[in-house]
Image: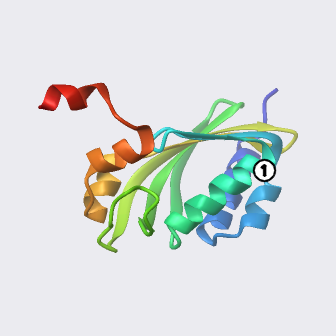
Amino acid sequence: MTMDSDRMFELAQALAVAKSRQDLPVALRLLHPDMVLRSPAFGTTARGPAENERALTRFFASFPDYQVELTGHADDGETLVCWGTARMTMTGNRFGVTPNGARAELPVFITFTFADDLIAGEQFFFDLSVLCAQSGVSTDAVRHTLFGATELEGVRG
């Protein structure tokens, strides 16, 4: 079922604003009960309201000053793709490293799907190595924390 382009972007923009304010209640109200949030760079998938609430709470704890600016978008009537810039400071020890406290700025693109006039799916794409470089941490160390041992570790010697 197709959805109006303006309405899709309105929902995506409202979610971007809510997340930039770390306003969890507003963000959750925009999500469909079957919402699936995927962040491939972190290797995470959250399904449904409870998992999405936990994922966002954890994300805001790790990046308390997170802000995203959507600068463009396109759609096919069912899926919306937005692109822009995320700004955030990595904090805490979630990733097994000690960040430098610098605010990272990185390009992002996000795909959205919709159901019942709500956001039903979000995939949030960014380059983990760019975030790590600007945060002064090893991408390999963060990937090890997130994904465990890799096949390449035995090859590196």
Query: Which residue is drawn at the image coordinates 79% and 54% (left, top)?
Result: 30
Left or right, 136 with respect to 56, comes to: left
Q: Badge 1 is on which residue?
A: 50
Q: Identity of the amino acid at label 1?
A: Ala
Q: Which one is in front, 76 or 103?
A: 103
Query: Which residue is drawn at the image coordinates 64% and 66% (left, top)?
Result: 17
Element on which disc 1 rests: helix
With respect to residue 95, does 23 lie above or below? below
Residue 157 pos. (x, y %): 11, 31
With respect to residue 150, does 91 lie above or below? below
Is residue 67 something that shows in the picture? no
Left or right, 4 with respect to 104, comes to: right
Q: Quadrant of residue 75?
A: top right
Query: Which residue is drawn at the image coordinates 65% and 62% (left, top)?
Result: 57
Residue 22 pos. (x, y %): 64, 70
Query: Which residue is drawn at the image coordinates 32% and 66% (left, top)?
Result: 98
In the rendered image, the quadrant that contains the N terminus is top right
Residue 112 pos. (x, y %): 65, 40
The total number of labels drawn is: 1
